[in-house]
Image (cartoon, rainbow, N blue to C red):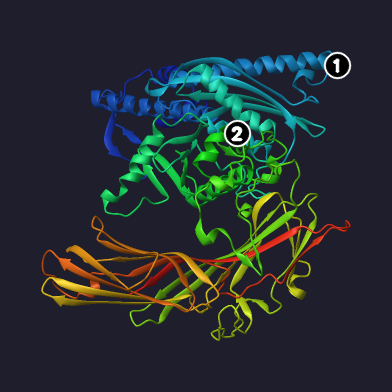
Amino acid sequence: MLQLQESQGLDNVPRNNIGHILTQHQQMSPFNHTFNKEVCAGNGVFLPNLSSGGLLMQSEEAVANKHAIAERNRRKRINAHLNTLRKLFPNLPKSDKSRVLKETVNRLKELRRNVADRYSLKENGGGPSLSFLPGENDELNVSYCGGDDGEEGRRLVTVKAVICCEDRPRLNGELTEAVKSVNGKVVRAEMATVGGRTKAVLVVRCGGGAAGKEVGSLTRALKAVVENKMLGCSPLLGSSLVSPGTVMISQFFVLSQRGDNIVFRDYRGDIQKGSAETFFRKVKFWSEDGEEEAPPVFNVDGVNYFHVKVAGLLFVATTRTNIAPSLILELLQRIARVIKDYLGILNEDSLRKNFVLVYELLDEVIDFGYVQTTSTEVLKSYVFNEPIVIDAARLPSLGPASMFMQGNKRMPGTAITKSVVANEPGGRKREEIFVDIIEKISVTFSSSGYILTSEIDGTIQMKSYLTGNPEIKLALNDDLTIGRGGNSVYGYGGSSGSGPVILDDCNFHESVHLDSFDVDRTLYLVPPDGEFPVMNYRITQEFKPPFRINALIEEAGPLKAEVILKIRAEFPSTITANTIAVQMPLPKYTMRVSFELEPGVVGQTTDFKESNKRMEWNLKKIAGGSEHTLRAKLTFSQELHGNITKEAGPVSMNFTIPMHNPSRLQVKYLQIAKKAKGYNPYRWVRYVTQANSYVARI
């Protein structure tokens, strides 16, 4: 009966008033009582033990247990309340209870002031404060509000930002990304939207830097949002390459082959100085780690390095964030293409002479680490510097590859060395358009000479110097088919072969109109400025390879062996391949190699790279239908154990073949829809075949 009365009395007291509970409990129990250690089954209630005097005697152990249970319950209730407050202030350190209570009190005071202000406005017949309504002009005001020490002695800075701009669907996401980019967290946010305009007040807490630096960083990030650059207009090919706000890099720089810093831009300041030297040293000595060359992406001390090689230069981007590597590599390629479009020639000399223009381009392409655009046409509205044109005659000769036959005409060297913004000498612009069909082939031969795998990765590139952006009509093969459809296409016959041209798949540039493509295989487009891919395609069916490779290695004595390499060109004799390079790994115990070329040959060189045990055979050119042979005698430092063919090879080959395409895809005609009388611009079309992975097993 005693327990029942106490339970009813406790239920009438608020659970968070511990002092009141204890006082009422003492008033209701003026007598002492003891409890047995036995517990009622399933209830967890102690039974009273009456003494002979009729009073409940309480042992010291029972009292201690009772107070322990009460203290445990009290702490649970306090922690539950603290957890509720922590959910309201997730940015505060969980272990600092005083900070949580302080922020709670401050927040309550602020809410009281806001309520009082609103009641005052209501009583005066007013509405919301006019100062909080969005205005007609864009506004950005970032101010420092104070700072204190957080966990681990880090300095936490509170910043207030007022933003006013046009309302758009992803504005909240943009603001969140901007705050995250400076490692900040939103403590409080208020927004108002009226008539398509939005005004937001953000209270942001940032850590790890000086107050001025944090304010400046947040200002730059929010400025990109207000100007709608960060997300709204981020085209890499005239449209967004990725979802908005996800491309963020810290640094961009261009290095020469010697490691000289030609161009360097630090966008975020979150990577230590000397990153360019660290990158080049890692790339240069990568072979010491057992690999030939550095991969395009690697990590050093928490910094991700991305790089591509273009025209003998290293284009590099760094970041500490986790970004898709293919995205950054594509970005670097497009930055190199934009610079080449403006300079005409992409090499170390042109970059140094046009460094002002290059930095202006970089500032427009990337803003605070976020990609804005890589469209040459869009950039022409924001870039005003003129390039210093490098004389093409001063460039090193590219050999026969620099000109490509087109009937009885030759494509001029300006096809790859002309700027999209610079005029010809005399102030006039020459009307011309260039179309390149470039195919990169991958073939793997078995040791018997049969084709194991074959693939073509092709692209139709266009570069226009036509004024007025007239519409272009580009016609391809009438028998062009997309998808295999169960047909065999093995009946090839080179460039003049018969049979349909069958593509596995293809994709087109956004400016291409495909209204009549399914009918007559014609493409209509208005070409943008600069070089761009009109169409990319892929072929995985078997085709006639341009070269046949036969490789043989056999032992010629106790510590000797002989290698015989034969190359046969299987394209027409009217075509000549250029810059052919053949490489073959040799057994690791190879000490010396002596080469024997065919008598009377010109333009062929051989070499043995002892560091990586590789023999190289370079040929300046090979005419169609010809065959060339190389013999090499190997000397070993110790006797080989096992099959020698397993320790050598495979043979790899690189080459370039102008005016030849194994796929037989052709441009039938190129029409320019401009009715002006006497308007007849130059049209240049060329075909190029290059080796992507051309390998023969031994």
Q: In this view, does 289 lie above or below 46?
A: below
Q: In this view, does 484 lie to the left or right of 692?
A: right
Residue 337 locus on image (x, y percent): 58, 48
Q: Is the C terminus in the top left, top right, bottom left or bottom right quadrant?
A: bottom left
Q: Is residue 200 above or below residue 254?
A: above
Q: Residue 398 or 69: which is nearer the viewer?
A: 398
Residue at the spot 52% in from the left edge and 74% down from the top edge: 540
Of pointers 1 and 2, the one earlier in the residue sequence: 1
Residue at the spot 47% in from the left edge and 45% down from the top edge: 313
Q: Is any atom of residue 318 visible in this view? A: yes
Mark whose residue sits in front, 1 or 2 = 2
Q: Residue 86 or 144: which is nearer the viewer?
A: 144
Residue at the spot 27% in from the left edge and 27% down from the top edge: 62
Q: How crowded is mark 1: few (under 14 residues within 10 Å), some or many (20 or more)?
A: few
Q: Is any atom of residue 6 visible in this view? A: no
The three-letter code of the residue at mark 1 reads Gly
Residues tagged 1 and 2 counted as in contact (Cβ below 8 A):
no
Write down the residue under mark 1. Answer: 125
Gap between marks 1 and 2, in whole Å?
Answer: 51 Å
Q: Is residue 284 left or right of residue 198?
A: left
Write down the residue under mark 2. Answer: 363
The three-letter code of the residue at mark 2 reads Asp
Q: Residue 6 or 670: which is nearer the viewer?
A: 670
Residue 599 locus on image (x, y percent): 32, 73
Q: In this view, does 602 lie to the left or right of 398?
A: left
Residue at the spot 56% in from the left edge and 71% down from the top edge: 660
